[in-house]
Amino acid sequence: MIPRPGPKAKSCAIALLSALLIVGCASGSGKSKPGEAARILRDQRITRAQLEEASNAFADRYFTLMLSASERVMRDNKDINQCRIMNGLRLLGVSSMYDIATSPDTITQLVDQLVVVTLQNYFWVDSGRAQEIWGPRAQFLVENLRRAREDIWTIAGRVFTDAQLEELDLSIATWWSRRGGTEFVAYVRFSEVSSVKGEALIERVRDGGGLLEPLDRATEQVENANLALDRSFFWAKRLPLFANWQIEALWYDMLIMPDTQRLLASVDTMSKAIEIVPERMKMLNGTITGAQDTARDLVDRIFHRVLVVLIVALSGVFIIMKWRASRKETKS
């Protein structure tokens, strides 16, 4: 007969079995299975509302960066062409950024902002073109464009995985190497930059293949309609902030026109001539005064000479008459 285990033996067996199970679970959790990291990341996904807020906040941040950089470049700058280019850059960039922030699709907002800021850095910063145009003043613009690039890529890191970010970066760099070189990069969009593979990437993220909370296709259109009103208010509030830049752009365009330059040159010449008038009047007054003094001296001299001649003549006449009278008396 096999002896039955006692109560103590049962307790020891149960404790040993529990310890083995705990160790087994711990060892199993140390080796993550494929897809385990992705499952954990899904619990920390960014929502569409959070992404919308981040996109709007970046648009405002971009406006602040461009405003401060442009003011530093244009302040006390007498070069009209430099001011004109800087004003055009900030006007195109800021209006484009707010245009993107009010677009209907949240993911498209992010990738479009990513494309614009990255291409601006390619064109103005990495190429050294900003320094060629503005010289030492360009440093303010270079620093702020770099900050904008860091900010937008940080936001993208909350939506895309590292591999997806590399894919986006490669798409932008490839497009730039083939078709880049234009200063109007502010209005280049991801749909122009991306290939079919890039569009597929966006769809994967939209469906939950990245770090963004999956969008419900059934309610997506309704959510877009609800956001449309909020976006219109967002745009309306910010439009007056840079509307005067458009007026400045027209003014600078007028200033560099050849006809305007000739007109300004004529006005400048006239203003200089007007400035000279008082000096010339002083000279004229001095000349007139001198002429008057000279005339007075001349008249005085002539008068004195005439007076002497008259006195001599009268004296001669008097002497002659006196002489004739004496001869008549002698004859009689």
Image (cartoon, rainbow, N blue to C red):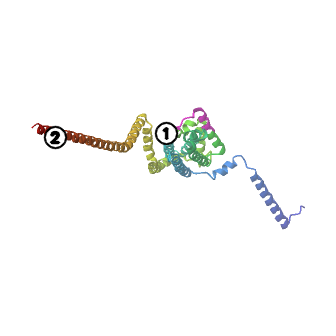
Q: Residue at x 79, y 60 (%)?
A: 18
Q: Quadrant of the N terminus?
A: bottom right
Give 296 or 119, whichever is nearer the viewer: 296
Quarter that holds the C terminus: top left
Q: Height in image: 177 above or below 67? A: above
Give the x, y percent position of residue 101: 51, 46
**The one of 154 and 126 positioned closer to us in this rendering:** 126
Residue lying at the far right in this picture: please name it: 1
Considering every residue shown, the one lying at the far top of the view is: 178
Question: What amino acid is found at the position of numbered circle 1 in the picture?
Answer: Asn
The residue sitting at 69% across, 49% down in the picture is 37
Q: Amino acid at mark 2?
A: Lys
Classed neighbour count for the residue bearing mark 2: other residues with Cα under 10 Å, few (<14), some (14–19), many (≥20): few
Residue 322, labelled with which disc?
2
Q: Over which residues does the magenta segment extend?
A: 170-184
The residue identified by callout 1 is: 81
Which quarter of the picture shows residue 26? Answer: bottom right
- Horizontal side of 119 relative to 290 (left or right) equals right
Q: For the residues marked 1 and 2, what is the alpha-carbon distance in whole angstroms?
A: 97 Å
Report helix, strand or loop for mark 1.
helix
Point out the tag, 1 or 2, that comes first from the N-terminus: 1
Q: What secondary structure do most residues of the magenta stretch adopt?
A: helix
